[in-house]
Amino acid sequence: MEQSEEHMAIEAAGHLFRKMGEFDVKTIAKILVNGKRHPLIRMDRSSLGDDVVYIAAALKQQAMVETLDLSSNGITSSAIKDLAEALTTNQHLLYLKLDNNPISDDGVAHLAQALSQPDIVLKSLYLSDCRISDRGALALAEALKSNKSLVTVHINSNRAIGNDGASSIATALEHNTTLRNLSMFQCSIGDEGATRMLACLDNTGVLNLNLKCNQIAKTLMDQLSECTINKKVKERNKRIQAVAHDLITEEAERMVKIKMIDLGKKEEEIQTKQTELNVKVKEFEKKKDKVDKKENAKKAKEEKKKEKEEKKTRAKVEKEEKREKDKVEKERRIKVKEMEKDAALKRKGADSMTLVIAGDNKIDKETLVELFLDIVEDTSVLSDSDFEKTVKGLMSVEGRTVEFTIINTSGHDRFSRLRALQYEHADAALVVYSASDRVSFEDVSFQWLPEINYMGKRPIFVCGMHTDSRNDEDLRPTDVSADEGKELAKQVESRGFFEPCTLEDMRKMMTTVYKELKKKK
């Protein structure tokens, strides 16, 4: 039975993460409508062009695709029309990535018409570098006024979007209640558009606004940043108050239940004591009868009684002596057992913990493994192949010896189903990205978390690597700040966020990972 379930899990993972580029688009469309769930389908850079209509047809047939990446495929506005129609009927697609396609304003108009429909379920839409101008931004803004599903919209690197487009979207946000993340990175927005955004930001639900690399004065950017930070603090306080209210209610209900249980127990105790008292009264009456009989026979049997008393006294002394000896022997046996128990605890083996490393860049993962090997003792390499490198070592954590096993997996698509098995048997996953590579940072939530969670949700820890290559004082567009890393870790419910550079950083990180996972157990 266990072998059958394991085989099914491997087949499911293989089907999910198969490299779709090995099939023509018609075959892929047939696969998508096979009735199975597809959390992630990546078809970027596949030269689909207008053949994307076959994918649109599959979506119209309720293909169960949750995340679809069609970036860099040369998709035009005419093909987008079919895809937009599919969005109005498909109830499974939540994330759609159309970056780097010549969609233009006409294509955005088709998408906007679909987004205005009441039954749309799409949560995230990515339209970066799609040749969109202020006219397309206006169409998208009109859709946002009535849309109730979108949480994230990216229209980065559309340099034809200027102040008019930003103002249109700002006006739309005042009517939208669901959008939380808006990115207009590297457009042509100036102070006028930024000022309009700032004026309406407090009246919107947007918590993350990215207007970097535009023609905006630093003072305005600082004001926008301060406004979003204040909104995040208010949102967090609301959640804390709601959680506190729920906890207080639960605690009050729990205390009432405990009081009721205590009252029931006290009633039972009173009844039990009453029964015991009745028994003692009867025993006392019996003893009194015996005493009376003895008094009546006392005069006739004085000598005999005296002899019996002496025997009784001797027996009592002997009994006390025996009781004392038994007591000493019992204490000795207890001490022996305690010593044996302590010895057994000392002989008990060290704790063990298995961690899987996942991420885009091979160098980031190898650097993490090297830091690990430098801080542990009794290291050994269990396996070293194209697919994985597994090492282990011992480390002292708060006086306990812990055996850590680190599995560095390959990020190649052909090993996806083998990675799925490693996730299933690991205690946690370490998801890494490069602090100077924004693509690897975005892939944490776009690729690696869906892949890890497909085989069952696991504890994760987010790690930013090579922070020495990042200029914290003057961040480049490709750099990822520590605050962005912390925010991502919070959004994906990571158990911790780290940027290990030194051996001391690595020791602190492994100690924190061990403590967090012990809390779970």
Image (spheres, rainbow, N blue to C red):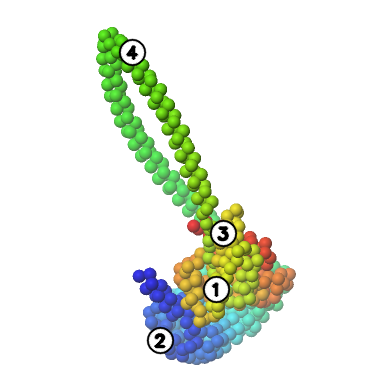
Q: Residue at x 54, y 51 (%)?
A: 346
Mark 4 and mark 3: span between their CA atoms? 72 Å
Residue in the foreground of this view, choosing between 164 and 480: 480
Q: Amino acid at mark 1?
A: Ser
Question: For mark 4, what is the residue?
Answer: 306
Q: Amino acid at mark 2?
A: Lys
Q: Sequence-wise, which precedes: disc 4 or disc 1?
A: 4
Determine which of the numbered discs, if any, sits on residue 30 in the image.
2
Q: Nearer the viewer, mark 4 or mark 2?
A: 4
Mark 3 and mark 2: span between their CA atoms? 50 Å
Q: Residue at x 42, y 74 (%)?
A: 9
Residue 443, x across and y down, in percent = 57, 75
Q: Amino acid at mark 3?
A: Val
Q: Amino acid at mark 4?
A: Lys
**Alpha-carbon neighbours of circle 2 within 10 Å: few (<14), some, or many (≥20)?**
some
Mark 1 and mark 3: span between their CA atoms? 20 Å
Question: For mark 3, what is the residue?
Answer: 402
Q: Sequence-wise, which precedes: disc 1 or disc 3?
A: 1
Question: For mark 1, what is the residue?
Answer: 383
